Image (spheres, rainbow, N blue to C red):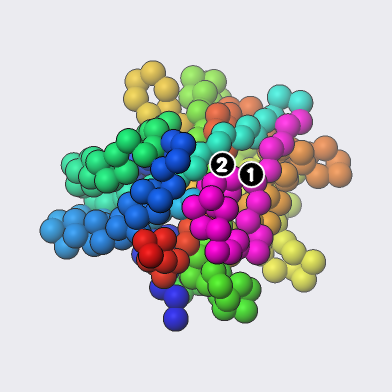
């Protein structure tokens, strides 16, 4: 039975470190070996710093998958859906490898990130690195709780992980989408709290969702809380975290799911909007600067890379 990477469904952490790499020419054999050794590296430091609750995720970019694992391809693996409508844009960035390191200690994340880079060595180029952190009680820097609609308990696995019936060869894997959003907090904080709440359709302090009749069709909740043809909620597992310093701030958005479709539907609802032209007004105050799609293979597939 395939085993999933623990970090996909792990509970929220206090600190995150996201590493995005591109492979350099003719290094695929070395990279396969290095990636196959990463789970053991995560386990080593998770044991050494057991109080930190370390969790890691290794993912392969959609454009790089066939090179790194020519034996097979996940059924629904496809590129990030580039979208644009008026001034709302979802750009695409090409990354070959994604490494997510999360724990309750920023120094442990730094140690593990250093070891990851040492292991991959000169076979890759580090294109982007983002240090993220938990803000207050799981809030985005806008002041609103992030991931309120996340699945809980065992349901997290049902949403995030592919099962045997969906794709037996790649069961226990997950489709991953990331976007690094940059917030315009000066503009956002110029709004009255009630106006901010109307943009979200949720109260800021108590995190109470508006009643259905009080949600504007342009509110963030209205645009991302979607239903399928049977009336069931369309869900993803978010593992997003805020990042920033005194110059720029934002959210590193991370979505795991057993299919790429739920994320794609939500993104289209935000950017393109509905048949009446209602898009997500939260996008007036934040802009995605990156976007990429990956596949998170099971530990079994990662082990195959080293053979």
Q: How far across and down, in percent of the image, does residue 168 sit? A: 58, 76
Circle 1: element type: loop
Q: Earlier in the sequence, mark 2 or mark 1?
A: 1
The residue under label 1 is: 80
**Taking the image as drawn, is residue 244 in sight?**
yes
Question: What is the number of the mark on residue 97?
Answer: none
Please tell me whether residue 161 is drawn above or below residue 265 in the rendered image.
Answer: below
**Taking the image as drawn, is residue 211 in sight?**
no
Q: How far across and down, in percent of the image, does residue 278 sit? A: 78, 39
Highlighted range, magenta: 61-85
Residues 177 and 35: in front is 35
Q: Residue at x 49, y 52 (%)?
A: 68
Residues 247 and 33: in front is 33
Q: Residue at x 56, y 73 (%)?
A: 169
Please tell me whether residue 65 is drawn above or below residue 217 in the rendered image.
Answer: below
Circle 2: element type: strand
Q: Which residue extends farthest front? A: 26
From the viewer's perspective, tell me whether residue 114 is left or right of residue 245.
left
Q: Which residue extends farthest left? A: 48
Q: Give me the C-alpha separation between circle 2 and circle 1.
A: 5 Å
From the viewer's perspective, tell me whether residue 56 is left or right of residue 239.
left
The residue under label 2 is: 292
């Amino acid at each position: 039975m395939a085993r999933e990477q623990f970090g996909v469904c792990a509970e929220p952490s206090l600190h995150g470190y996201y590493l995005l790499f591109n492979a350099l020419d003719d290094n695929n054999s070395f990279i396969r070996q290095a990636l196959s050794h990463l789970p053991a590296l995560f386990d080593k430091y998770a044991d050494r710093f057991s109080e930190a609750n370390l969790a890691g995720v290794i993912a392969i970019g959609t454009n790089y998958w066939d090179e790194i694992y020519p034996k097979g391809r996940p059924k629904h693996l496809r590129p990030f859906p580039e979208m644009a409508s008026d001034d709302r844009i979802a750009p695409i960035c090409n990354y070959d490898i994604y490494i997510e390191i999360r724990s309750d200690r920023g120094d442990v994340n730094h140690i593990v990130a250093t070891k990851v880079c040492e292991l991959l060595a000169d076979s890759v180029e580090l294109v982007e690195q983002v240090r993220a952190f938990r803000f207050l009680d799981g809030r985005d820097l806008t002041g609103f709780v992030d991931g309120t609609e996340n699945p809980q308990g065992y349901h997290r696995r049902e949403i995030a992980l592919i099962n045997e019936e969906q794709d037996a060869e790649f069961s226990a894997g997950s489709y991953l989408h990331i976007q690094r959003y940059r917030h315009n907090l000066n503009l956002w904080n110029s709004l009255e709290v009630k106006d901010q709440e109307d943009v979200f359709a949720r109260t800021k302090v108590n995190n109470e969702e508006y009643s259905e009749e009080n949600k504007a069709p342009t509110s963030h909740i209205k645009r991302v809380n979607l239903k399928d043809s049977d009336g069931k909620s369309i869900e993803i597992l978010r593992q997003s975290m805020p990042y920033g310093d005194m110059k720029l701030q934002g959210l590193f958005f991370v979505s795991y799911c057993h299919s790429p479709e739920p994320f794609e539907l939500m993104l289209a609802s935000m950017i393109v909007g509905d048949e009446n032209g209602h898009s997500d007004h939260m996008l007036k105050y934040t802009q995605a600067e990156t976007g990429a799609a990956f596949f998170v293979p099971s530990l079994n597939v990662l082990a195959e890379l080293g053979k």
